[in-house]
Image (tube, rainbow, N blue to C red):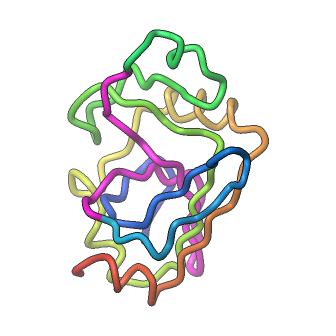
Amino acid sequence: MILPQQVLFLSVPYYADDAGTKQIFKNVAATKERPFLVIWSDDEIVLSVNITSEKFENSRQIFDKNLYLIGKYNPPLSKPSLAILNCIYVFDYFKELDKKLMKDGAKLNESEFQNILDRIEQVTAIPFTKEELFKCNSF
């Protein structure tokens, strides 16, 4: 079972808000796995936010209300990271998804996790079915 505070490492198509269109590019192949912090789960779905460790190109990004700089990231992340808070990824839950947990299911620091939850406001839900996840990932 996948639990809140754990991190999944999945390859999924990208979401982009191109000029306010809020498009999900499900037809664009996901080229690499990336981390997703689980914020809620049950035996049917997993809700998560995207985590990026990409370097910020300007300091303004640090103050973006849709981003949260995770200070106490290890475990389960291996380097400083940002939680992207304007999108919630909704994954169908299936047993094979457990194989994609990072660091043997280690959980993010409780206070960091709570800070992330407290900052989530208006979001776009991005659903992915079991079939879509199987197309992009090897389990």
Vertical placement of residue 100 versus 27, above or below:
above
Q: Is residue 117 magenta?
A: no
Q: Residue furthest bottom?
A: 131
Q: Is residue 118 left or right of residue 112?
A: right
Q: Main secondary structure of the magenta part?
A: strand
The residue positioned 52% from the left and 35% from the top of the image is 113
The C terminus, quarter of image = bottom left
Vertical placement of residue 34 versus 2, above or below:
above
Q: Is residue 26 left or right of residue 98?
A: right
Q: Position of residue 97 (x, y in %)?
A: 36, 75
Q: Position of residue 78 (x, y in %)?
A: 21, 35
Vertical placement of residue 134 versus 16, above or below:
below
Q: Is 118 in front, or is 111?
A: 118
Q: Quadrant of residue 43?
A: bottom right
Q: Quadrant of residue 132?
A: bottom left
Q: Is residue 52 magenta?
A: yes
The residue positioned 58% from the left and 64% from the top of the image is 24
Q: Residue furthest right?
A: 122
Q: Quadrant of residue 90?
A: bottom right
The N terminus, quarter of image = bottom left
Magenta residues, as a range? 31-56
The residue positioned 59% from the left and 32% from the top of the image is 114
Q: Position of residue 28 (x, y in %)?
A: 41, 70
Q: Is 132 in front, or is 97?
A: 132
